[in-house]
Amino acid sequence: MIDAIVVVVVVAMVGVYVSWRAGRLDRLHARLEAARAALDVALVRRSSVALEFASSGLLDPATSLLLASVAHDARSAQNGHEREGGRGREGGQESAPERGSGQELPESDLTRALRAVFGQPGFRSSLNGTEGADELLTELESAAHQVFLARKFYNDAVAATVAARRRPLARLLRLAGGAPLPEFFEIEDSLVGAGEAGQGADMPHLTG
Amino acid sequence: MKVGLVCPYTWDVPGGVQEHIMGLAEALIDLGHQVSVISPADDDAPLPDYVVPAGRAVPVPYNGSVARLAFGFLSASRVRRWLKEGGFDVLHVHEPAAPSLSLLACWVADGPIVATVHTAIPHSRAMHAAEPILQSALEKISGRIAVSEAARTTLVEHFGGDAVLIPNGVSVRKLEKADPLPGWPGAGGALGFLGRMDEPRKGFAILLRAFEMLAAERPGLRLLVAGHGDADEVLAKTPAWLRERIVMLGQVSDADKVRVYHSVDVFCAPNTGGESFGIVLAEAMAAGAPIVASDLDAFRRVLRRGQAGLLFPTGNAAELAAAAGQMLDQPELRAGLSAAASAAVRDYDWPVVARDVVRVYEAVVPAAGRLVVAPQ
């Protein structure tokens, strides 16, 4: 009799534990999705502001053309990612996590172009007194900063989710279901050179 | 005439556009014109005396790769100063749709502006996004030149209007005489190839198959290859007996390139497409190399329908081997083709091409008035 009670209690405890772990994994996935959405919003905003800058008439045509072409490439990659995600969900299956590789490069390119343009010595003072320049610069700075933060939080969520899913119990019982393993979003997002900003340093402001 | 030429790419890195501008500038000077070239370059870079540096070019992502370009307000003010001090009769910009000095020059100048378009760019949506930005600067161009039919199509598609076709030039003077590399072509005969080995459209794989057929019957025959590419990777795929008869020079200097043309009995251009003009072919002709080339439209035109070099069906290694074999067997055929090539290439010699360009200048200058710096 005692034996039976012990078995029942143990089974119940194991059940509670497993469902708690599954629930935790579920919450982690929800956090991950929210972080990804925030990152997408930040990236879209950054490329929009860059495009706006390119067509503002504040810059010379060569700079405008350069910014427009990289911002456009980033925008196309963002759209590609959205389409891929949408299609995946309709099919009842998440898309393969290869999206990162297609989007990271154009986003890094946009960062590098912004760095080359806005990092020119005296850039800010060359725009002094031009109408609308200050607003756009502030907007761009804040959009770039938002990308920096959103990416940090998204990668945090990825790390937490991956760690939780690597635990033996999660692997054994396939608690994550068919969801693909999330991938880090690795881009260059600092507007100052890699040498100047240490890893994990807060996003410094534009120079000039 | 006082001519201001604008180069969009950094002068110290070799490239087709830079070479074109150098050839044109030197030919114009020889014709008695005053020429100044502005180009991205370090202020302390060793430059010919007709080149004015516009400051260091910045490496930026552009068109899917990293390009070294000059843009921004500092470059614009350098161009403005150069224009002001130059007092040119005509401004001639190259590749004006690249985000660099040429576009800036169109922006800061008013008056007679001539532009040469070099590359064929496929119509992309990115270009579409940039069109309004380009339009206002490019509208000022009064005479447009395309170096190839493909470049002309690009120009017409993107910006409407038409362009005069003036092909790329070659400097016959610099190419016609050179010593062969030591030991070349050798008693057993030699084939030659110049270009990227890893670019399929250059057709190196076709030449390699043809060479295998020829080499099996001709014990002393060798193949001389110059150009970028992974030599080990190529050689790994060829049989060992063949490998030792292929000499890979890799990337060579301009001077050595000329010597390569003079070091072979048969120069092969097995391209399968994409070659709008074939500057390599024209250079080989200028060096008087006997040529066998694919039957591409552009090659057929440059080689005068086969009179200045043998043509073989594009992509066909056996036909290439047959044509090259025929040339190796008949020295008098080679001599005839060499002479015909040297004669045919005169149409592309820089002094001839530069005269055509001057005619474009003369057409735009009276109508467009004086060249001035546009008010900011």
Image: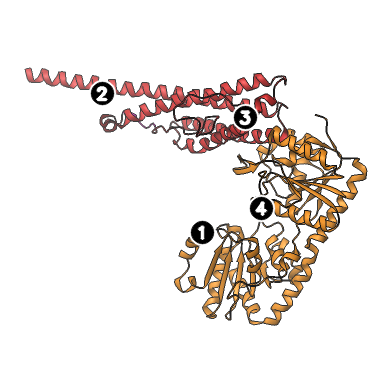
Chain colours: A red, B orange
The chain identifier of the residue carrying mark 2 reads A
The amino acid pointed to by label 4 is Gly
Residue to which mark 1 is pinned: B230
Instruction: Mark 4 and mark 2 in contact? Answer it, CB < 8 Å.
Output: no
The chain that hosts pointer 1 is B
Report which residue position mark 3 lands on. A118
Residue A18, disc? 2
At 58% across and 81% down in the image, what residue appears? B187
Q: Residues within 10 Å of mark 1 (few under 14, many from 20)?
A: few
Tag 2: amino acid: Val
Q: Are marks 1 and 2 in contact (CB under 8 Å)?
A: no
From the image, which quarter does the C terminus of chain B lie in? top right
Residue placed at 78% from the left, 34% from the top?
A: B136
Confirm whether circles 4 and 2 share one chain. Answer: no
Where in the figure is residue B168, as x and y percent of width and height? 75, 57
Q: In what element is the residue under mark 4? A: loop
> Decide: marks 1, 4 in contact (CB < 8 A)?
no
Is B278 left, or right, of A28 in this rendering?
Answer: right
User: Is B269 positioned to the left or the right of B6 in the image?
Assistant: left
Q: Which residues are magenta?
A: A175-179
Q: Which residue is mark 4?
A: B15
Q: Position of residue B153 (x, y in %)?
A: 75, 48
Residue B336 at x, y percent in the picture: 74, 78
Q: Earlier in the sequence, mark 1 or mark 4?
A: 4
